[in-house]
Amino acid sequence: MATKVIKKSDIYSRKSRGDGASGEYRIFNRAKTRGIKIFFSDASTLHEVYRDSAWEEAKCEFKGLKLASKAGLAPKPYKLVLVKEKSYYGGVQYRPAVIMQHIKGHTYDTPDDHNDIDTSDELAALNEKLTNLGIHHGDLHGENAIICHKTQKLMAIDFAFCNITKPKRIRRRRKK
Ligand SMILES: Nc1ncnc2c1ncn2[C@@H]1O[C@H](COP(=O)(O)OP(=O)(O)O)[C@@H](O)[C@H]1O
Ligand SMILES: [Mg+2]
């Protein structure tokens, strides 16, 4: 099935909430329940965008979020789309993007008064939980982990470079 193409002007927030290495993050809908991570790419045709490394990153992001969110360790992804916008150089450009659950919270690197958790231990524990599911995040640091204000739960984001293997099986010793 062809990937849905949306216009950049259809995205609710005009400004980016977070700029990172792979792209930008914006609020997707008026109710602020969904966000969209748009990857960097300046592909000017659909043919080109599918061959761009950003497309692979977006697919990886979607897969990682999907698996981790089932265990409550990440925001839920909804759709992998292409964002069409005017190119800086004239013409149009397409960028892969993932629409996901927007978490109202703060990242570890955001100075916040109610952040009194030991970040290093919490991050290590989150990383271990992901690894046990077979998700090797590869880039789990303060800015890639959000504490949800509502649940106070820590969640991982930014799965663009994750590696997924078979989950670790916990072997039980047989009684002799
Ligand atoms: N689901 C989300 N809910 C709330 N904020 C988010 C979400 N995903 C990303 N962000 C914000 O956007 C920033 C950049 O997102 P991230 O996935 O880390 O992209 P990058 O690969 O560019 O670092 C994050 O540090 C965070 O502040
Ligand atoms: Mg990041």
Image (cartoon, rainbow, N blue to C red):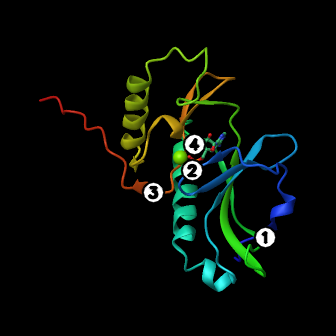
Mark 1 or 4 closer to N-term?
Answer: 4
Query: Neighbour class for label 2 at 10 Å: few (<14), some, many (≥20)?
Result: few
* Three-letter amino acid code of the residue under disc 4: Ser
Residue position for label 2: 20
Separation of marks 1 and 4 at Cα, in angstroms: 30 Å
Separation of marks 3 and 1 at Cα, in angstroms: 25 Å
Separation of marks 4 and 3 at Cα, in angstroms: 16 Å
Residue shown at 51% from the left, 56% from the top: 160
Mark 1 CB within 8 Å of ligand 1:
no
* Three-letter amino acid code of the residue under disc 1: Glu
Q: Quadrant of the N terminus?
A: bottom right
CB within 8 Å, label 3 to label 2 = no
* Three-letter amino acid code of the residue under disc 2: Gly
Quadrant of the image occupied by residue 82: bottom right
Q: Nearer the viewer, mark 3 or mark 2?
A: 2
CB within 8 Å, label 1 to label 4 = no
Query: Neighbour class for label 3 at 10 Å: few (<14), some, many (≥20)?
Result: some
Quadrant of the image occupied by residue 105: top right
Please give the label number shown on residue 69.
4
Quadrant of the image occupied by residue 130: top left
Q: Nearer the viewer, mark 1 or mark 4?
A: 1
Q: Position of residue 93 (x, y in %)?
A: 72, 76
Residue position for label 1: 85
Query: Neighbour class for label 1 at 10 Å: few (<14), some, many (≥20)?
Result: some
Residue position for label 3: 161
